[in-house]
Image (cartoon, rainbow, N blue to C red):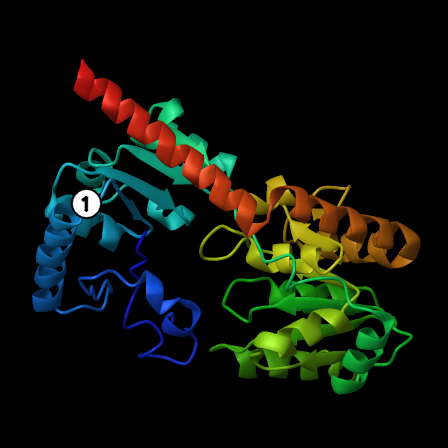
Amino acid sequence: MWLAYDRKRGAFNEYEEAAAPWVDPDFDPPVPLTLSTKSSPIEYVRDVQRMRRLVKEEEVDIVHMHMSHDHGLAALAGGRVARIRTFHAERSLIRRFGQSWLNRRADAVIARCHAHRQLLVTRFGFPMDRVHVISGSINSERFAPATNSERCKARAHFALPLDVPVLGHVALIDGRGQEELLDAATALGESALHIMFVGNGRREQALKQRIDNAGLNDRVRLTGYLRGGELLEAYAAMDAAFVAQPGNDASARAALEAMASGLPVLGVQTGALTELVDDAVGYPVSDRRVDSVASAISKWLTAPSAADTRGRAGRAHVIAERTFQREAERTITAYEQVLRERSTRTAT
């Protein structure tokens, strides 16, 4: 198995992490690929030629694509190889030029949630048995419930009192519900509730101004971008997490990180969050209206013991269904099915 990735990721702005530090070099393909949407025409043509050579010389059985850009490369490279495409985001499920041509060059597709599977069937005509649902996963060993000692240390690090409820929000990307969360906190009036925003983004200054205007400076912390142990420490300081959007890849990673950390999630019912956050593991929020968000916060605040129970249930669900191992097993099962079907078609 080889793992090719976007070699230019992280080189153009501060909001994207470079992929290289997270990839084991032992999995680099013998023929290097740029694999970037920011590739020049020369780099794109070179990638097509190199992928064609890789598939032929190394007798590749399956090419698994995760972006339309990669899908196009694999389709143009040709070869007698099975192609599987994962659709990570709903924006990839919009009809656009060339989409039908690409879809015809996929032996199977993987959706991140059942709602996306339905769109692939109804909007693009994929047979139901060729669309696999493989939900997002998380490292449940890295993200784990904090000990009392770790919690105390984290509260001190972020200047948060020990005796107040802290609601976390991770990723200051546009449209992730930051404004609605602040407005809901304001609507609740005088409260011990503290809010912790983790991340940075283009609208960070506007968010700071909104916090100041609402008079919430003493109850809101903005940590900036955190990674590694600092991110784990942020989760250790939280009592619950608010998630309004599944994310760019529909994996609902922020929700999974919080659940793996033993925190109940207040999740707006959209996309993959609808299938992940229910009353057993958190507090479903019907929509982004301020009163809906405020109602979920109030429900969480008024029953701490129930919140703890939901947090433990969320952790149990992640361990049972949303680990990297489970995702790998389901992906291998999809590979095996595709290869069996190709073998049957060839034999007949």
Q: Which residue is mark 1?
A: 97
At 82% from the left and 69% from the top, the residue drawn is: 147
Q: Is residue 145 visible?
A: yes
Decide: is 33 above or below 284. below
Quadrant where the image shows the C terminus: top left
- Looking at the rendering, which quadrant does residue 344 occupy? top left
**Within the image, what quadrant is residue 243 found in?**
bottom right
Closer-to-camera residue (78/239): 78
Q: Amino acid at mark 1?
A: Phe
186 to the left or right of 272: right
Q: Position of residue 24 (x, y in %)?
A: 39, 66
Give the SS element for disc 1: loop
User: Which residue occupies the foreground of this view, 195 or 259?
Assistant: 259
Q: Position of residue 94 (x, y in %)?
A: 33, 43
In which quadrant of the rendered view does residue 225 lie?
A: bottom right
User: Residue at coordinates 31% horizontally, 25% vertically from top-left?
Assistant: 340
Please give the name of the residue rendered at 18% of the width and 21% of the height, measured from the top-left corner: 346
Residue 32's spot in the image, x, y percent?
20, 65
Q: Residues within 10 Å of mark 1 (few under 14, many from 20)?
A: few
Residue 283 shows up from this direction: no
The x, y position of residue 201, in whole percent, is: 49, 77
Where 64 falls versus 290 (above or below)?
A: above
